[in-house]
């Protein structure tokens, strides 16, 4: 009986230690989830009394299917308006986006790791004339993450390869664009929360 109790006690301690090691790790591991995103509001009033306003929100979720690969998605909404000096609306755009992505991390279990992200998305913009422009895009983005503590990480990413096609309402064809290279306008900094 003493041996059985000792065996059960050792198994429970081993299980607790293993659970703490998985729970209290820096970096990413299989089964980890994270959220990040963006929210912003911008308003500009010019000297001629013209005004521009923009609101945008874009939550993001990721899940690690193994120690190296995360998959996830992002939703986006933005509203921008512009008024001329007389107060008349000259632009009113509403955009909705949805994106799926996959990331590959080189050093997932460490505080610092490089990653590559491949994303594919769809977007729809409705303008002031109530016309819709729809498009799809794909992009490859390298980046790095650094864990500040067990739950928060700082992230840096820069877009280097992208393709986009937009079908304008009423137009016969589409507008296609392809870009390669480091674009300093497509640098992003942010935080993610791992749980």
Image (cartoon, rainbow, N blue to C red):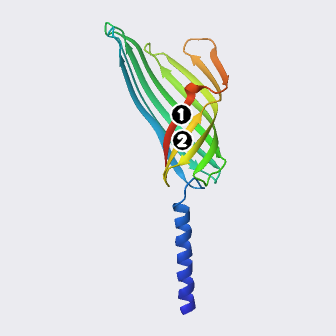
Q: Which mark is residue 154?
A: none
- Residue 152 position, x and y percent, is 48, 49
Name the residue furthest bottom: 1
Instruction: Report the label total.
Output: 2
Please determine whether, in this image, residue 119 is positioned above or below residue 112: above
CA distance separating discs 1 and 2:
8 Å
Q: Is residue 98 left or right of residue 84?
A: right
- Residue 172 position, x and y percent, is 62, 11
For the N terminus, which image quadrant? bottom right
Q: Quadrant of residue 30?
A: bottom right
Residue to which mark 1 is pinned: 188
In this view of the protein, which residue sits in the foreground, 111 or 79? 111
- Residue 164 position, x and y percent, is 62, 24
Element carrying mark 1: strand
Instruction: Answer whether residue 103 is visible to the viewer in this image.
Output: no
- Residue 147 position, x and y percent, is 53, 50
Please determine whether, in this image, residue 180 is positioned above or below residue 147: above
Element carrying mark 2: strand
Please determine whether, in this image, residue 5 is positioned above or below residue 107: below
Q: Quadrant of residue 48?
A: top left
Q: In the image, what residue occupies the spot 51% across and 44% down?
A: 154
Q: Looking at the image, is mark 1 or mark 2 earlier in the sequence?
A: 2
Residue to which mark 2 is pinned: 155
How many C-alpha atoms fall within 10 Å of the one at disc 1: few (<14), some, or many (≥20)? few
Please determine whether, in this image, residue 21 is positioned above or below residue 157: below
Q: Quadrant of residue 104?
A: top right
């Amino acid at each position: 009986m003493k041996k059985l109790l000792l065996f059960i006690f050792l198994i429970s301690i081993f299980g607790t230690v293993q659970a703490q090691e998985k729970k209290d790790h820096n970096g990413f591991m299989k089964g980890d989830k994270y959220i990040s995103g963006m929210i912003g509001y911008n308003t500009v009033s010019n000297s001629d009394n013209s005004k521009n306003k923009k609101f945008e929100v874009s939550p993001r979720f990721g899940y690690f299917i193994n120690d190296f690969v995360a998959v996830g998605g992002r939703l986006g909404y933005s509203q921008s308006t512009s008024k001329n000096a007389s107060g008349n609306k000259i632009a009113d755009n509403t955009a909705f986006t949805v994106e799926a992505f996959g990331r590959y991390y080189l050093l997932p279990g460490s505080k610092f790791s490089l990653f590559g992200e491949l994303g594919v998305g769809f977007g729809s913009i409705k303008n002031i004339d109530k016309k819709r422009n729809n498009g799809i895009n794909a992009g490859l983005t390298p980046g790095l993450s650094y864990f500040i503590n067990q739950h928060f990480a700082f992230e840096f990413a820069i877009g280097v390869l992208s393709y986009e096609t937009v079908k304008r309402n009423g137009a016969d064809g589409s507008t296609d664009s392809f870009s390669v290279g480091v674009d300093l306008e497509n640098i992003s900094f942010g935080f993610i929360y791992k749980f």
